Amino acid sequence: GIQVEQSPPDLILQEGANSTLRCNFSDSVNNLQWFHQNPWGQLINLFYIPSGTKQNGRLSATTVATERYSLLYISSSQTTDSGVYFCAVEAGGGNKLTFGTGTQLKVEL
Amino acid sequence: NAGVMQNPRHLVRRRGQEARLRCSPMKGHSHVYWYRQLPEEGLKFMVYLQKENIIDESGMPKERFSAEFPKEGPSILRIQQVVRGDSAAYFCASSPPTRDTQYFGPGTRLTVL
């Protein structure tokens, strides 16, 4: 099946800093989503982005489907950004998402 | 527009008991998915259902686990004769007929004593 790798696995930032999270995948995808799992365990949809670039406030994402990677940018980070960021992809038309191992982000004051 | 709803949020069972997890998709969504997150791990796909049909159950354990999405009512994930290794967070997601974005519920945290 498709492989999804995320980097870095862990990241500690000072409040106000910017960061880039990366997601590499091993095959062509029909769907790519970014999620934030907050410290309470809830999964929050960030982006549906199988290709192209999208922005939502301090967050933006870019997927280069031909090169099989996606990037999530967090600008002016806040403590509420802490949690785990997951990239998930769907390939082959089966609708099931394959999740990466996540990036654990901690934003400190 | 209410999101995906799951209940109960927390469930405690003793070994050998049955666990029933419920999921109500977002309004207008006809596709339901179940995922499991074991402690310190990522999420793994279990099953994909539409009304009255199981579309893909390739991620379901072969024994003790079953899922349904009846014509009326919520989707149910049933775990019979639970064991400690079943302790996990179980997430339900739903998507619209276009089947693009999957929206996740808050999860049910199952603890098996």
Image (cartoon, grey):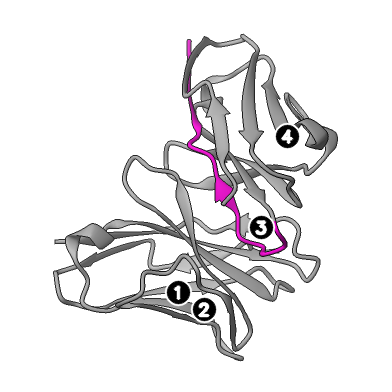
Q: Which mark lies nearer to you, 4 or 1?
A: 4
Marks 4 and 3: which is nearer the front? 4
Percent x, y for residue A68? 73, 34
* Left or right: A95 in relation to B104: right
Cα–Cα span, label 2 and label 3: 16 Å
Q: Residue at x 34, y 50 (%)?
A: B38
The amino acid sitting under disc 4 is: Arg
What residue is shown with label 2?
B75
- Amino acid marked by disc 3: Gln
- In the rendered structure, are the residues bearing label 1 and label 2 in contact, judged by CB atoms less than 8 Å apart? yes
Q: Give the mark nearer the N terminus: 1 vs 2.
A: 1
Tell me the CA gap for discs 3 and 1: 17 Å
The answer to whether tags 2 and 4 share a subunit is no
For residue B33, which quarter of the picture?
Answer: bottom right
Check disc 4 and report the residue beneath it: A68
The x and y percentages for residue B1 are: 71, 63
Residue under the image location 49 percent in, 47 percent down: A42
Membership of B97 in magenta stretch: no
To which residue does mark 1 refer?
A: B22
**Quadrant position of residue A63:** top right
Q: Residues within 10 Å of mark 2 (few under 14, many from 20)?
A: many
Q: Identify the residue at image location x=78%, y=44%.
A: A50
Q: CA distance from mark 4 to mark 3?
A: 21 Å
Helix, strand or loop status at disc 1: strand
Residue type at the position of mark 2: Ser
Q: Mark 4, residues whose alpha carbon is within 10 Å: few (<14), some, or many (≥20)?
A: some
- Disc ID at residue B102: 3
Q: Secondary structure at mark 2?
A: strand
Range of magenta residues: A92-109
